[in-house]
Image: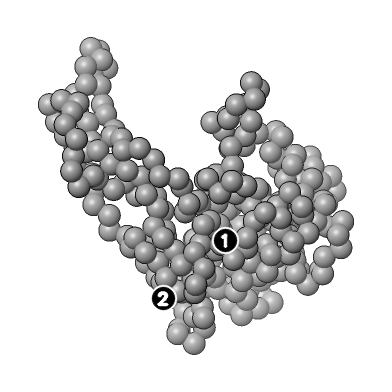
Amino acid sequence: MINYTECLTRLMRDVVSRVEPLSFIDPDAVLMFGRFGRSGAEGPYATCHCLCLPESEPGYYYWRDTSTGELTRRSEWFVPRTPQVTVGSTRVDYLISVALPRFTDQRLRATRKAAFYGDGEPWLAKLDTIVHELYHIDPAGAGIRQLASDDGGQSSQCHGPAFYLDVATFVKAYLRTQPDPALYEFLRYDFAGLTSRYGQVVATTFRNFPSYPQIYLDPLAEQPHGPDTPEIVRLRRVSQPRLYTQQDVVVREFSARGTRRCPSCCQAA
């Protein structure tokens, strides 16, 4: 059996210890977890999720008549919040979700990444993806890293040519430090190869899978007056936990067709 997210976590720790621009990252405050994603299907290979958004001012959604521009309805006033995730005594600030088995079946050839790695081995695409998600972590701990715009301000985009180039530069810098090959050996195998070699592929998930900690809209207990509209839309009340602890972190087995909860004997400690 191979616990894929545990392998990724060990690799992440080594990367941030060797690549200076990522050395500000506290690996104890980053949790890797698995989500189901079929190989060949559309969608990201991995995603960085922030759990440390700064407190924002209350707001509301609104709708206007397309012909008159008149305000026709609005939502309740709310504040965006993120659940608190604590593993042991450590509060988690960032989550990195990995789509399995799609992540394991990445290819380098005929992709945007190929331009940075030439005739490099296919598994470099997976290492690039992990470094890419780590690079999204904001050094100021204020959310997802923002790119600089041409005028020196903050861009609304999270990606750009310079971002992709930086990621490839960090990947190459990491490999130049000659890390232990055993740390990234698992990246060499696609999902079929992992299954053949290890039998089972498991990953850390959350007890309420396929859900996971994510931003929710918290309606204000005391709703301000206005703006006046013919209709006020009530927000869906939160159904997910607002606090996740070690007890909410479990292990699931992943296959090409889906997932299943693992027996208690192989659950995360």
Q: Is residue 225 left or right of residue 143?
A: left
Q: Single out the residue that lies furthest toward the left.
A: 230
Q: Is residue 192 visible?
A: no
Q: Give the CA distance from mark 1 to mark 2.
A: 17 Å
Q: Single out the residue that lies furthest toward the top.
A: 68
Q: What residue appears at the point 62 percent right and 60 percent down from the top-left corner?
A: 26
| Residue 53 locus on image (x, y percent) | 46, 47
Q: What residue appears at the point 39 percent right and 57 percent down from the top-left corner?
A: 83
Vertically, is 89 above or below 151?
Answer: below
The numbered dot on residue 30 is 1
| Residue 54 locus on image (x, y percent) | 45, 45
Q: What residue appears at the point 62 percent right and 76 percent down from the top-left corner?
A: 2
What residue type is disc 2 on?
Answer: Gln
Q: What residue appears at the point 21 percent right and 38 percent down from the top-left corner?
A: 76
| Residue 67 locus on image (x, y percent) | 25, 13
Q: Are marks 1 and 2 in contact (CB under 8 Å)?
A: no
| Residue 156 locus on image (x, y percent) | 54, 31
Q: In the structure shown, which secondary structural element does the residue marked by tag 2 occupy?
A: helix
Q: Is residue 229 left or right of residue 183?
A: left
Q: Is residue 203 left or right of residue 224?
A: right
Q: Label 2: which residue?
A: 247
10 Å neighbourhood of mark 2: few (<14), some, or many (≥20)? few
Q: Please tell me which residue lies in front, 105 or 147.
A: 147
Quadrant in which the N terminus appears: bottom right
Q: Please tell me which residue lies in front, 83 or 126.
A: 83
What residue type is disc 1 on?
Answer: Val
